[in-house]
Amino acid sequence: MKLFKRARIRYILIRHAIPHDLWEEATEQVTVFGGLSAVEKAHLRELATLFLYEKHFSGAQGVEVTPDMRVLVASQACLLILTLGMEYFDGWREVVIYPGAFRVSRDQMDEQGIVHHEDRALSGESWSRGPVILSWDDIQQERLGNHPGRNVILHEFSHKLDMLNGKANGMPPLHSGMDRHQWTLAFSEAYRQLQNSLEHHHRPCINPYAATNPAEFFAVVCEYFFSAPEILEQNCPDVYRQLRLYYRQDPLFRLKDRMIDTKL
Ligand SMILES: [Zn+2]
C-alpha cells in the first residue's frame, strides 16, 4: 500500500507538476515565503502540485479562477504543512473563491446550545469536512505583506488543521513529544491576556478578532506566526514556541537569517 501511494505521488509530481514560469510568477513577492531555502521552496512546490491535483477550485459571484490564483492559494496553504505532509489536508476537497468579502446570514448554535443569528461580512470561512471559502480581494491585499499578521489563506487552512481532531477548539492533534499541558498553558494565558487588554481598552498586541474564541485565537496566531513572527514572538513567546514545535518551522529565525544575508 505504501509503495502504491509513493508511486501515485511520483506520478502526480511528474505528470502534473506546476510549470516553472507559473510557479515563479504566482509566488514571487509573496512575503510569507521570505527566507525559505531552495530545498524548502522545491518541497513547497511539490506539495502545492499535490494540493492542486487533489482539491477542486471554484469561483463564486462571477469569479473565474485562473491558474495563478490556484497556485497562489495552494502554495500559501501548503506553507502550513511544509514539514507535516499532505495527509494533514485530508477529508475535504473544495476551495471556493469569492471576489471580495461575502455576507453570511444564518442561525448558529453556541456551546451552551443557544441559537444566535449572525449576519456579517467574512473574508474567509472553513467548514468542518467541507469547503474552504476565501475572498480574492483579501488575498491580493495581503500577498505583499502590507498588513502584518493578516493572511486569510493561512487563517482558514489552519482551521482545517485544528479540525483534524473534531470541532475547531484551538488545539489541533499535537505531535508525540509535545506536551498538552504546556500548550494549554501557553494558549490560555495569552488568550486571557488579550481579553484582559480589550476589557481595559488597551491597545491589543495582536488582531482583536483573536479574542472571539479559542479556535479563532489559534487561527489568528498562526497568521502571525508566518506573516509577522516578530510580533508574535515578542508578545506571546510561549505561543510562538508551541507553534514552532507544532509546525516544525521557525519563521522568525529564517527571516532574520535572510535579512543578514541581504545585508552582506
Ligand atoms: Zn476563523
Image (cartoon, helix red, strand yellow):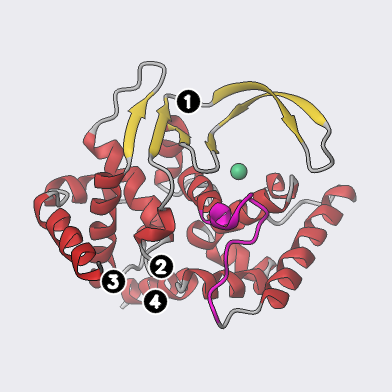
Which residue is most to the front?
1
Pointer 2 with pointer 3, Cβ within 8 A: no
Residue on which disc 3 sits: 37
Estimate the spatial distance between the alpha carbons at disc 4 and disc 3, rounded to whole Å.
11 Å
In the image, which is nearer the foreground, mark 4 or mark 3?
A: 3
Secondary structure state at the residue bearing disc 2: loop
The residue where tag 2 is placed is: 84
Q: Which mark is residue 100?
A: 1
Mark toward the start of the polypeptide (4 vs 1): 1
Residue at the location (35% across, 68% down)?
Answer: 35
List x then y, in percent, for residue 134.
Answer: 46, 34
Residues in magenta, as a range: 161-176
Identity, as a three-letter code, of the amino acid under mark 2: Leu
Considering every residue shown, the one lying at the far top of the view is: 62
Magenta stretch holds residue 113: no
Q: Earlier in the sequence, mark 2 or mark 1?
A: 2
Near mark 2 (Cα within 10 A), the count class, few <14, some 14-19 or many ≥20, is some
In the displayed structure, 25 sits above or below 182; it is: above
- Mark 4 surroundings within 10 Å by alpha-carbon count, few (fewer than 14), some (14 through 19), many (20 or more): some
Q: Main secondary structure of the magenta part?
A: loop
Residue nearest the viewer, comparing 52 with 264: 52
Distance from disc 4 to disc 1, alpha carbons, whole Å, reads: 35 Å
Look at the picture and state if 169 lies above or below 114.
Answer: below
* Image quarter hosting the N terminus: bottom left
